[in-house]
Image (tube, grey):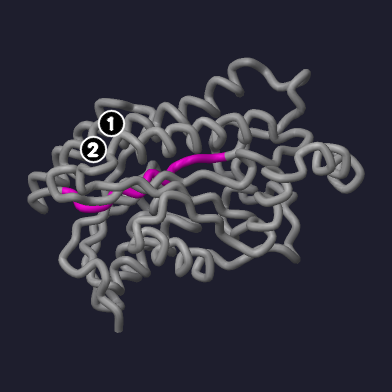
Amino acid sequence: MATRFENQTVWITGGGTGIGRALAEQLAAEGARVVVSGRRLDRLEETVAGIHSAGGAAEALVCDVVDEDAVKAAVAHIVDSHGGIDVVVANAGYSTGGRLHQLPVADFRRQLDVNVIGLYSTVHHALPHVMQRNGRIVLMGSVSYILTAPGTGAYSASKAAVHALGMCLSIELAGSGASCTVIHPGFVESEIGKVDNDGVYQQEKTDRRPGKLMWTAEEAARDMVTGIHKRQTEVIVTGHGKFANAMGRHLPGVTRSLIPRFWSKP
């Protein structure tokens, strides 16, 4: 079995479900000591139990990335317990839905607080420790950063900010020994489609994402781990994600004209 992250300490925010859990499992299988954080301890403990049963090393840590003091405490705990941090995966986030003329300002602000400010806080406080180990910063974006659709403006705006932060950080880290990778997935199985605009998981909520295009979190995580290991600046995940990214980059006018024809109204 490949052990590309042998004896490295990896912190994954939003590590209790979906992509975060799949990344934790695969990185632990490759030798990493994984710390998963999030708001729901029960989900974090499920992730940790699965890793332990497979013979890996993992720890659960409650931390809401919107709470800067909690982020600072999480960083301090990881450094004190494990001696440092090699990889940070800033994965915590959710999706706010609603057309812009209807979406309350409070909902838009909450979207940015979690997906952008929370991500920045995670990176800001962990980065000095990552740099000491010539490690890796990983930001979870989305192909929505370049290919938006009706009702997804707030989420797309947040992921466009994540993309910009990642590109800037890659430049700032050049020559330092540390690196930044921005990951832009397409549709991947997760609970994000069942989280409401308050960031609360709702079991009964309908996931509107197209099931036929959905990749499993495990499939997506394999590509992501390879990109992280190779220190790629940008990783586009899923076949349809790569197609959407190419369309958004090279045929933006055509793409904007086609989306309203195929996207159902939220």
Image coords of residue 263 (percent x, y) = 84, 45
Range of residues picked out in magenta: 85-94
Residue 127's disc is 2
Distance between mark 1 and mark 2 Cα atoms: 6 Å
Kindly identify the amino acid type of the residue bearing the numbered disc 2: Leu
Image coords of residue 180 (percent x, y) = 35, 46
Which residue, given by chain and number where applicable, does mark 1 sit on?
124
Q: Nearer the viewer, residue 30 or 25?
A: 30
Image coords of residue 140 (percent x, y) = 46, 46
* 44 is within the stretch colored magenta: no
* 93 is within the stretch colored magenta: yes
Is 192 placed left or right of 64 in the picture?
A: right
Q: Nearer the viewer, residue 44 or 158?
A: 158
Q: Residue at x 39, y 64 (%)?
A: 225
Q: Residue at x 30, y 74 (%)?
A: 29
Quarter of the view holding residue 232: bottom left
Work out whether 52 lies above or below 181.
Answer: below
Is 156 placed left or right of 12 in the picture?
A: right
Q: Quadrant of the C terminus?
A: top right
Residue 266's disc is none
Q: Is residue 207 visible?
A: no
What secondary structure is marked by label 2?
helix
Is 198 placed left or right of 37 in the picture?
A: right
Q: Residue at x 30, y 63 (%)?
A: 48
Work out whether 132 lies above or below 66.
Answer: below
Kindly identify the amino acid type of the residue bearing the numbered disc 1: His
Work out whether 207 lies above or below 150.
Answer: below
Q: Residue at x 54, y 38 (%)?
A: 200
What secondary structure is marked by label 1?
helix
Query: Looking at the image, do the residues carrying marks 1 and 2 touch, with CB atoms under 8 Å apart?
Result: yes
CA neighbours of label 2 inside 10 A, class few (<14), some (14 to 19), many (20+): many
